[in-house]
Image (cartoon, rainbow, N blue to C red):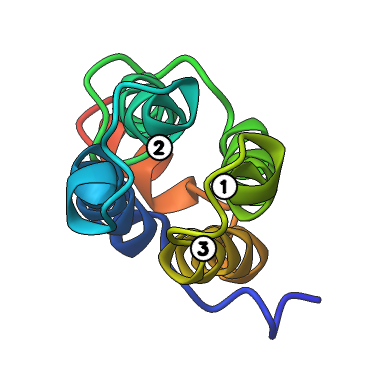
Amino acid sequence: MTKMRFLSTRAHGALDYIVAIILIGLPYMAGTADRSFGQWIPILLGISIIVYSLLTRYELAIVRLIPMPVHLILDAGGGVLLIASPWLFGFAERSWVPFVLIGLFEIATALMTRTDTAPLHRDATAGRP
């Protein structure tokens, strides 16, 4: 299982913020921005990713509260919601491909990201006796 997890937490963090921005703009890029509830799913998911990323125990956070395994579960769950959202919220006839692709990407990165943030903890304690 460790060989499958090759993505560093630092790289994952950068991807989190990039994907979050893409999700916030997705309804406008995919043609689903029509003030329906379905439009708000990727926007709310993008905002959520930013919030829990800022609170995750990894290099690109501000307050390190959420363990990396919990963060990855949130990512995978968000990916599943994103994949299902065009059919759950009735806009699949207009656009579903970007939602499925980004959802699969979220799940894949959750499965490929290392959960060990030991270098982060070593850096934080480096100057201590």
Question: Closest to the observer: 11 or 105?
Answer: 105
Earlier residue among tags 2 and 1: 2
The residue that disc 3 covers is 96
3D distance between C-alphas at marks 1 and 3: 9 Å
Viewport quadrant of the N terminus: bottom right
Q: Residue furthest front?
A: 93
Residue at horizontal 61 percent and vertical 40 percent from the top: 90
> Can residue 17 be spotted in the picture?
no
Look at label 2 and name its amino acid: Pro
Q: Residue furthest bottom?
A: 3
The residue that disc 1 covers is 82
Residue at horizontal 39 percent and vertical 52 percent from the top: 119
Disc number at residue 56?
A: none
Earlier residue among tags 2 and 3: 2
3D distance between C-alphas at marks 2 and 1: 7 Å
Q: Is residue 76 above or below residue 63?
A: below
State the image coordinates of residue 35 (x, y, percent, origin top left).
30, 21
Q: Quick check: 29 left or right of 8? A: left
The residue that disc 2 covers is 42
Question: Closest to the observer: 75 or 80?
Answer: 80
Earlier residue among tags 1 and 3: 1
Look at label 3 and name its amino acid: Trp
Q: Give the foreground label among 2 and 3.
A: 3
Look at label 1 and name its amino acid: Leu
User: SS for tag 1?
Assistant: helix
Viewport quadrant of the C terminus: top left
Q: Are marks 2 and 1 in contact (CB under 8 Å)?
A: yes
Circle 2 crowding by C-alpha within 10 Å: few under 14, some 14–19, many from 20: many
Q: Give the foreground label among 1 and 3.
A: 3
Circle 3 crowding by C-alpha within 10 Å: few under 14, some 14–19, many from 20: some
